[in-house]
Image (spheres, helix red, strand yellow):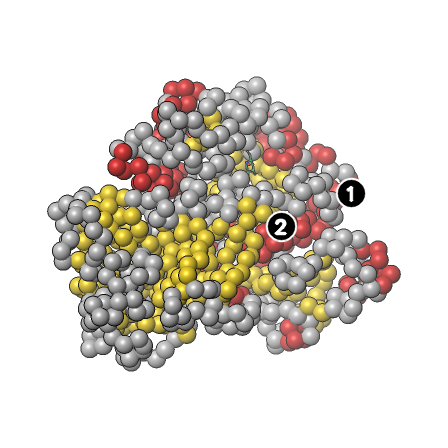
Amino acid sequence: MIEWDEAARQFHLRNDRVSYLVRVHDNGAPGGLYFGPALAAGQSYRHLPPRDFRGFSNRVGEPIPLEMPTPGSGDFRMPALVVEQADGSSVLELEYREHTIVGGKPAIPGLPATYAESDGEAQTLELLLADERSGLEVRLAYTIFRDLPAIARSVRIQNGGRAAVRLTTAMSASLDLPDADWDLLQLSGAWARECQVRTRRLVAGRQSVGSVRGASSHHHNPFVVLRRPATTEEHGEAIGVSLVYSGNFLAEVEVDPFGTSRLRIGINPEGFAWTLEPGNEFATPEAVLVHSDRGLGDLSDAYHQLYRDRLARGTWRDRPRPVLINNWEGTYFDFTEDRLVAIAEVARDLGIELFVLDDGWFGARDDDTTSLGDWFVDRRKLPNGIDGVARRIAALGLQFGLWIEPEMVSAKSRLFEAHPDWAIGLPDRPRTESRQQLVLDMSRPEVVDHLFDVLSAVLGSAPISYVKWDMNRNITEPWSAALPADRQGELFHRYILGVYELYGRLTEAFPDILFESCAGGGGRFDPGMLAFAPQAWTSDNTDAVERLSIQWGTSLAYPLSSMSAHVSAVPNHQVGRITPLASRAAVAFFGVFGYELDATLLSTEERNEVADQVAFYKRHRDVLQRGRFVRLRGPFDGDGNETAWMAVSPDKRRAVVGWYQVLNRPAPGPGRLRLRGLDPSLRYRVSAWPERDDGLARANVGERGGDELMAAGLFLGMDRAEAARQGDFQARLFVLAAGGAES
Ligand code: DGJ
């Protein structure tokens, strides 16, 4: 997969789908020549423009492709690496020294990353660059995956000199592209409206998304796509860049005056400065680059496969995920053991498999003003402890799960009284309040050790099979009592390293527990978290209409198996909207399904409906959690009134199609929905859910060819009278089963 052409001084990373070409310029700097569809092996591509590069001396400012650009030597575009040396300068002459090519993919110390399970699955090139004068050594790692159009990049920087240096920018990847005819697609939003697809045309200058909040954030996801303006879900060129990191990040593109573009992604340089003592090394997080010439759908397929199968780890990576019920919106802080057991009992009767006890079980937490950090049970609510309630729930035949928020401390807590300096913030300045809680200084090993001990005690004290790890505020007044003045710029990154350390230790100590990450919903829905917790709470917004765009956007980068999606009560707690129960389920089915309500309040009719939903989901769980997700019709297209998507089993013999209409429209036309990803030669039995005797069912139910379903499509028309009765917020699912497959 990786060729080194000594004569051409060229590296060619190649598989059936893509080529990534790097040449060593005459001055020793590596420059990217090409990232795109696979090119023939055994060829020199050194002739690809621009001309070879001997040094900037008389060509200052020209757009020479560089894999690790540094400032001050004639390349005025965004640097990937800025190292302040003892004399105060940041000028470096990084020259190629040597390289290694190994099978598989070495781990990155202290950081989550994608991996290979065998040497044949991937190959890794490591380029060693050195700056003679400062002694700085930079290792650029590139992994190509055999079966995916994906390249993972990361960087290690070692101080081989005699004096300490300061890293102020250390990006994970920099990619030079020969033109700027791209749209920049980003996933942006806020709490309860995460991952909205936003697209803008590249223009001269810099354009970026990022976070300085201490978490990847609700506001921008660490994932962007450069797509050709004509690229669609099915066709056209796109390059995705995703950062396996959960802290402050920057994804930025610069278009220079010559019309080339440079994309960089990595730790946000804002607020970052890292002192590197002689002999020490700094490792950047990993960036995953995907190239597709087959549209956004294909780009997502690559990320889904990689993140589901070779980023997520542990016992739960491949296991079917349980259907859960979470008590948060059902009870908030107001519960007793008996109330929880009553909810669980109904849930068990409905076929639900896991009961999750959310916030409020510890300390004296009757609201969100107190007790974070005091991870011992509140006996007023749970007189028999976690063990007592967990055993009663286990006796019902349900698994038991627990909510925690390890990284936080309430000012009103025993932990804060004992260790006020463990909270991030300046002692002589007011701390910004956010949800009445403070952030623990996870950069301190003693904090991580303490949390490991107390949480291990809780998790070991009862039959707990699931943990929801929440994180509900961002970092303000960033200052650590444990770091010297000249190292405060390390806090944000050290914080995340501490979070990873704790996650790593807890997931290792409790390998059978399914971890779900959460940050007030999708405030830290990123690949870094997925390496520890294979699923994440996609959003606190459970409204069926809002969830269409949130789940659509999230699916650009993340697989169905990572997206938790629940049915909650109406009027919805975030938007007050009343949607049909069936529509709420039809949206939440596409992901890791569950409920977020007080099941004892369901009417008999609703209970029957929920039981039917749970049975439907279990029947199709493998397709809905691990199938290929195909986006058909988008909430960000046109007036956004319709959404349609489908999940297809890997053998293409089964599929579930979801079609959603926000507002009802009178006198509909004979609409059709063309499907994708089926086998054109197979005959599928089509059934509709929920079962109704209406025009939609009559037109579609029966046997249909895969060719017909893809070329002509499902029929979505209705007669006027029927349409008039529909009402808003309708959803319909179609199940496709070939031959003996279950329908
Ligand atoms: C925010 C989460 O996203 C919710 O699901 C819930 O767990 C609350 N926190 C509890 O405080």
The residue where tag 2 is placed is 547
Looking at the image, residue 612 sits to the left or right of residue 557; the answer is: right
Identified at 40% across, 70% down, the residue is 259
Residue named by callout 1 = 605
Name the amino acid, label 1.
Glu
Percent x, y for residue 198?
54, 57
Tell me the number on the disc at residue 152. Answer: none
- Residue 182 in the image: x percent, y percent? 47, 68
User: Disc 2 marks which amino acid?
Assistant: Arg
Lateral position of residue 406 relative to residue 322, left or right = left
In this rendering, would 318 be left or right of 344? left
- The image quadrant where one finds the N terminus is bottom left
Q: Please determine whether, in this image, residue 248 is positioned above or below residue 308.
A: above
Mark 2 secondary-structure assignment: helix
Secondary element at tag 1: helix
The image quadrant in which ligand 1 is located:
top right
The picture places residue 142, in percent across and down from the top left corner, at: 31, 62
Determine the image quadrant of residue 153: bottom left
Viewer-proximal residue among 446 and 305: 446
Say few, some or many: other residues with alpha carbon within 10 Å of mark 2 (under 14 / 14 to 19 / 20 or more).
Answer: many
Q: Does the rendering let one see residue 657?
A: no
Instruction: Look at 65% across and 27% down and name the residue there.
Output: 339
Mark 2–mark 1 distance (CA, rounded to whole Å): 25 Å
Q: Is residue 579 above or below residue 370?
A: below
Question: Does residue 26 show up?
Answer: yes
Q: Nearer the viewer, residue 689 or 219?
A: 219
Q: Which quarter of the rendered picture does the C terminus lie within?
A: bottom right
